[in-house]
Image (cartoon, grey):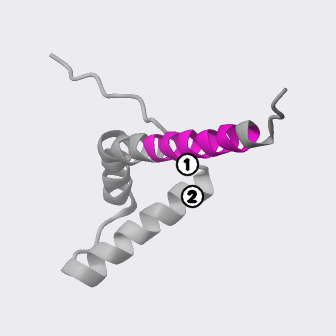
């Protein structure tokens, strides 16, 4: 039985993907003295993109929604203050 992989929630440009793979390779070498090839770094990046990035993406969306809600409430309050009584 083959496991279906989730589609990525976001995609990177080829340049961003290359830089991310380079960063992974450098981190693994500096931190763990482990030299990864391009294939291994791309696999780690794919794991993060499919499994971890959605959590950060959803949190960012939640934070923006909260910020916008607070801002709209403030605008609404400002508009009520500008309303003239008859």
Image marks 2 and 1: residues in contact by CB distance under 8 Å: yes
Magenta-drawn segment: 61-79
Query: Which residue position is annotated with label 1?
Result: 12
Q: Is residue 72 left or right of residue 21?
A: right
Q: Secondary structure at mark 1?
A: loop
Q: Between 14 and 71, which is closer to the camera in this rendering?
A: 71
Identify the residue shown where x is 33% and y is 75%: 27
Residue drawn at x 59%, y 52% is 14
x, y (%) of residue 34? 22, 75
Residue 77 falls inside the magenta stretch: yes
Which x, y percent locates residue 70?
Answer: 55, 45
**Residue at (38% x, 53% y) in the render:** 42
Residue 11 in sight:
no
Using the image as rendered, state which of residue 9 and residue 5 is in the foreground: 9
Which corner quadrant holds the C terminus? Answer: top right
User: Where on the picture, by quarter, is residue 15?
Assistant: bottom right
Q: Where is mark 2, residue-wise?
A: 16
- Where the N terminus falls, by quadrant? top left
User: Please, is residue 45 above or below residue 31 in the view?
Assistant: above
Q: Is residue 78 visible in the rendered structure shown here?
A: yes
């Amino acid at each position: 039985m083959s496991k279906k992989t989730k589609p990525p929630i976001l995609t990177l440009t080829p340049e961003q993907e290359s830089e991310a793979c380079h960063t992974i390779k450098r981190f693994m070498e500096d931190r763990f003295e482990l030299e990864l090839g391009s294939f291994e770094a791309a696999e780690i990046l794919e794991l993060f993109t499919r499994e971890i990035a959605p959590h950060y993406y959803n949190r960012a969306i939640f934070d923006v929604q909260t910020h916008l809600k607070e801002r709209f409430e403030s605008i609404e309050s400002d508009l009520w203050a500008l309303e003239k009584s008859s």
